[in-house]
């Protein structure tokens, strides 16, 4: 994603040209992307095209130039560099003296009603967050997802017509037979998937039901899924996994490894709603993502559970204590029982209703009873439990282990999703 920073100043305010150039160089020195200083509108016609325009008002009397340039860009962020803490105190003070503050609000009031993808950033963190969201948008619209084996018959909330996803997100959806997984699985040797075997073997603290052969075969199945994704140059998948149990192993480690250790996403049970939700969330979080079923509790918490999960939940350098188990429903293969990170902030999301709506819920992980359900379990106390129940769009939720609600809301708006 190409970005350009354009600083606007007027000579009637900045009478000392050397001071203006010195301050411009200082506040633009941290930027890796191209930056331009426009004084009194001169050279505005030579500003190069980019995916995102970042506007930095340095004075008054530049409003018309800002609005003029913004019309040429699809995505615009106006940044309050003059606000204390965003740059050196003396530079902030000088920009305030030169009326950068009223210029910001004057331009923002026009941009927000005349330019669809215009955003206001009041701090460096807000600016980086908004750039992160726009980058995620570009990634999604250039992505490809595979639907492997269709959706499981009990996944009733996902769209039956895949065109809904393509039309909304511009993402390519390709249907793939499970035979491709099976063919890859037959070809893969122990050595081919040794790194996956070693990953789970080294990071697990205990093994209960699975044998060593179970772990070997589950690693081979995981490699089969990775091969199919790479063969199609795909960014992720929704895979119908239960029919694959006939091989004597499960796909739980495959989904877990992809969501833990790669830039791709994988959703269980052919749930394309969840795959698209994961694709949206993937680039917005420093944590890994988890897809899970909800189990409502008598104390207004929800015990989310699944037989997959990222061992590195909170960040990519910290592994949660993990036990190797078998798949809950079938007793086959290898699944993960990962310890819940108590008190961790989470964001749970789902896109559904023919790719037209989204729910975004915030909560935290709390202590709870381990139930007779899927192996990895996590009790979550939502900020608004009633809203979670009233706005539910389906079974599976995709969970990030940090607060990304504001970024998800911005991304949802970019895709014209209805937030409920």
Image: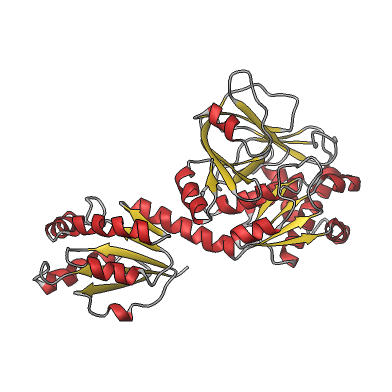
Q: Confirm whether residue 365 shows in the render.
A: no
Q: Confirm whether residue 8 shows in the render.
A: yes
Residue, x 30% and y 67% (percent of image)?
67
Asked whether, in this view, residue 161 is left or right of residue 183, the answer is left
Residue 360, how many percent across, how many down? 53, 41
Question: How many numbered discs sit on the rendered protein?
Answer: 0
Residue 192, how many percent across, how many down? 79, 60
Judging depth in this view, the residue of 169 and 130 nearest the camera is 169
Residue 181 sits above or below residue 63 on the image: above
Residue 230 sits above or below residue 133 on the image: below
The C terminus: image quadrant: top right
Residue most toward the front?
A: 114
Asked whether, in this view, residue 196 is left or right of residue 61, the answer is right
Picture quadrant of residue 152: top right
Judging depth in this view, the residue of 233 and 55 nearest the camera is 55
Residue 40, how many percent across, how many down? 19, 74
Residue 260, how many percent across, how many down? 63, 49
């Amino acid at each position: 994603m190409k970005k350009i920073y354009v600083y606007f100043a007027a000579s009637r305010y900045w009478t000392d040209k050397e001071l203006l150039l010195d301050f411009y160089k200082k506040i633009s020195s941290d930027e890796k992307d191209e930056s331009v200083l426009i004084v009194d509108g001169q050279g505005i016609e030579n500003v190069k095209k980019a995916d995102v325009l970042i506007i930095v008002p340095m004075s008054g009397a530049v409003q018309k130039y800002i609005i003029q340039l913004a019309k040429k860009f699809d995505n615009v962020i106006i940044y309050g560099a003059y606000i204390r803490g965003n740059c050196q105190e003396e530079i902030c003070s000088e920009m305030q003296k030169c009326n950068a503050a009223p210029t910001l609000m004057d331009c923002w009031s026009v941009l927000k009603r005349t330019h669809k993808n215009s955003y206001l950033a009041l701090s460096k963190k807000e600016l980086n967050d908004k750039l992160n969201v726009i980058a995620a948008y570009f990634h999604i619209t250039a992505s490809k997802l595979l639907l492997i084996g269709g959706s499981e018959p009990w996944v009733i909330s996902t769209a039956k017509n895949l065109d809904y996803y393509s039309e909304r997100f511009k993402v390519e959806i390709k249907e793939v037979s499970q035979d491709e997984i099976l063919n890859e699985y037959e070809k893969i040797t122990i050595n081919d998937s040794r790194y996956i075997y070693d990953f789970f073997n080294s990071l697990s603290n205990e093994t209960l039901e699975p044998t060593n052969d179970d772990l070997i075969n589950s690693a081979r199945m995981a490699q089969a899924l990775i091969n199919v994704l790479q063969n199609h140059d795909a960014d992720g998948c929704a895979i119908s996994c239960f029919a694959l149990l006939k091989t004597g192993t499960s796909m739980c480690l495959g989904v877990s490894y992809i969501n833990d250790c790669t830039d791709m996403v994988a959703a269980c049970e052919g749930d394309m709603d969840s795959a698209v939700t994961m694709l949206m969330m993937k680039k917005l979080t420093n944590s890994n993502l988890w897809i899970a079923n909800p189990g409502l509790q008598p104390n207004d918490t929800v015990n989310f559970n699944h037989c997959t999960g990222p061992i590195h939940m909170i960040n990519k350098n910290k592994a949660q204590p993990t036990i190797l188990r078998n798949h809950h429903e079938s007793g086959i293969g290898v699944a993960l029982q990962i310890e819940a990170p108590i008190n961790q902030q989470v964001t749970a999301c789902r896109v559904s209703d023919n790719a037209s709506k989204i729910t975004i819920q915030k909560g935290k992980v709390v202590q709870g009873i381990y139930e007779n359900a899927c192996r990895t379990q996590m009790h979550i106390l939502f900020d608004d439990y009633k809203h979670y129940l009233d706005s539910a769009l389906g079974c599976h939720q995709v969970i990030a282990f940090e607060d990304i609600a504001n970024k998800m809301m911005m991304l949802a708006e970019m895709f014209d999703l209805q937030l409920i």
